[in-house]
Amino acid sequence: KQEVTQIPAALSVPEGENLVLNCSFTDSAIYNLQWFRQDPGKGLTSLLLIQSSQREQTSGRLNASLDKSSGRSTLYIAASQPGDSATYLCAVFSGGSNYKLTFGKGTLLTVNP
Amino acid sequence: KAGVTQTPRYLIKTRGQQVTLSCSPISGHRSVSWYQQTPGQGLQFLFEYFSETQRNKGNFPGRFSGRQFSNSRSEMNVSTLELGDSALYLCASSLGSLDRGMYSPLHFGNGTRLTVT
């Protein structure tokens, strides 16, 4: 059974700091991994989708890496801003007809001005 | 392009009642998947519909059911509500069916907050 863990559960940083969020998974037989952000009371917004054949994806100040063999992914946020404050979740997709989509419980990020 | 729309935003029901939630996907998206989010269990996959057919189902009791219409809109029904069904219910849409692989991101609605008293 796939288990997805996100550490730390909460993180508070001053504005402008570079930071790394971690996601680990127990079964390396995955198709892809997706990072989302969730604002309070809202749905999820997709940030980056990394296919199993890729090592990293970048979008603006965000960079996500994937190491399937070690069961780890990191989300790097450069020059953090107060608007980055949200909960960040990773989700692992194990494909096939009986696919599984397993979410971590998220990291609550607070960026202080 | 309009995003994923979920209605209603909030619902309060009593134990034993049933409830129906609605999800309208992004235009052109044919896959709709449903999720339950609670503080204790986090986000859990309920089921996916594509072309009016259920493609996959998570580990939830039969009280949770769904359907999809020819215009790709989907409804989720929960019968005989229990206190533990209180949660944020999210739906997401995507272009293709997830059992063919997730080659494009999931697009989520803002959810329906269900409270069972």
Image: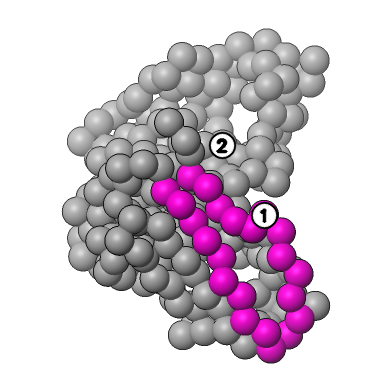
Identify the residue at horizontal 54%, vertical 42% (top origin).
Answer: A44
- Seen from the viewer's position, the closer of residues A47 and B97 is B97
Please identify the quadrant where the C terminus of chain A is shown.
Answer: top right
What range is drawn magenta here?
A: B4-25
Q: Which marked residue is nearer to the observer: mark 1 or mark 2?
A: 1
User: Which residue, given by chain and number where applicable, does mark 1 sit on?
Assistant: B9
The residue at 30%/38% (across/down) is: B104
The answer to which quarter of the image holds residue A38 is: top right
Can you identify the residue that label 2 sits on? A37
Front position in the image: B89 or B40: B89
Taking the spot 48% from the left edge, 21% from the top edge, the residue there is: A62
Quarter of the figure that contains the N terminus of chain A? bottom left
For badge 2, the amino acid type reads Arg
Q: Is residue A41 above or below residue B39?
A: above
| Residue A52, visible in the rendered structure | yes
Vertically, is B85 above or below A42? below
The answer to whether residue A32 is visible is no
Within 10 Å of disc 2 (Cα), the crowding (few <14, some 14-19, many 20+) is many
- Find residue A71 and report its horizontal and vertical position in percent: 37, 46
> With A100 as the anchor, is A81 left or right in this view?
right
Chain of residue at mark 2: A
Measure the alpha-carbon separation of dots 1 and 2.
20 Å
| Crowdedness near tag 1: few (<14), some (14–19) or many (≥20) residues, C-alpha within 10 Å | some
Secondary structure category for the residue under label 2: strand
Tell me the subunit letter for badge 1. Answer: B
* Nearer-the-camera pick, B58 or A71: B58
Q: Eyeballing the image, is A51 above or below A103?
A: above
Count of number-bearing discs: 2
